[in-house]
Amino acid sequence: MELGYFQKDVLIEKLAKKFYAIQGYVVPESYRMQSATHPAERACVAMALFAVEEFQLITEEESDEYESDEE
């Protein structure tokens, strides 16, 4: 499953805010984490990017395995 640009952007924002909340911080819903300059906020965005990319790799690998099993 390939995420569209806007879907990926929304997912990164949502994950970054969740990772930030795990650390005990709260930001307004309208706050854009990807525009942040604070190191802790930037780290949360980096973690979110990594999580989305890993998820996409895993789903691509599973899709490839499923297709090869059908052949």
Image (tube, rainbow, N blue to C red):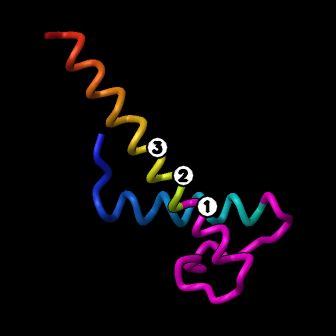
Measure the alpha-carbon separation of dots 3 and 2. Answer: 6 Å
Q: Are marks 3 and 2 in contact (CB under 8 Å)?
A: yes
> Camera-side residue: 48 or 27?
48
Q: Which residue is rendered at x = 83% and y = 63% of the image?
A: 23
Give how far across and how far down residue 61 sits, in percent: 35, 32
Quickly name the residue at label 1: 47
Residue 53 drawn above or below residue 9:
above
Type of the residue with mark 1: Met
Which numbered circle lies on residue 55? 3
Q: Which residue is rendered at x = 65% and y = 65% of the image?
A: 17
**Is residue 49 rendered to the left or right of residue 23?**
left
Q: Are marks 2 and 1 in contact (CB under 8 Å)?
A: yes
Q: Secondary structure at mark 1?
A: helix
Q: Could you tell me which quadrant the N terminus lies in?
A: top left
Label count reads 3
Q: Which residue is rendered at x = 70% and y = 60% of the image?
A: 19
Q: Secondary structure at mark 2?
A: helix
**Is residue 3 rendered to the left or right of residue 24?**
left
Q: Quadrant of residue 9?
A: bottom left
Q: Secondary structure at mark 3?
A: helix
Image: magenta residue range? 22-48
Residue 35 drawn above or below residue 15:
below
Give how far across and how far down residue 30 sits, in percent: 57, 78
Quickly name the residue at label 2: 51
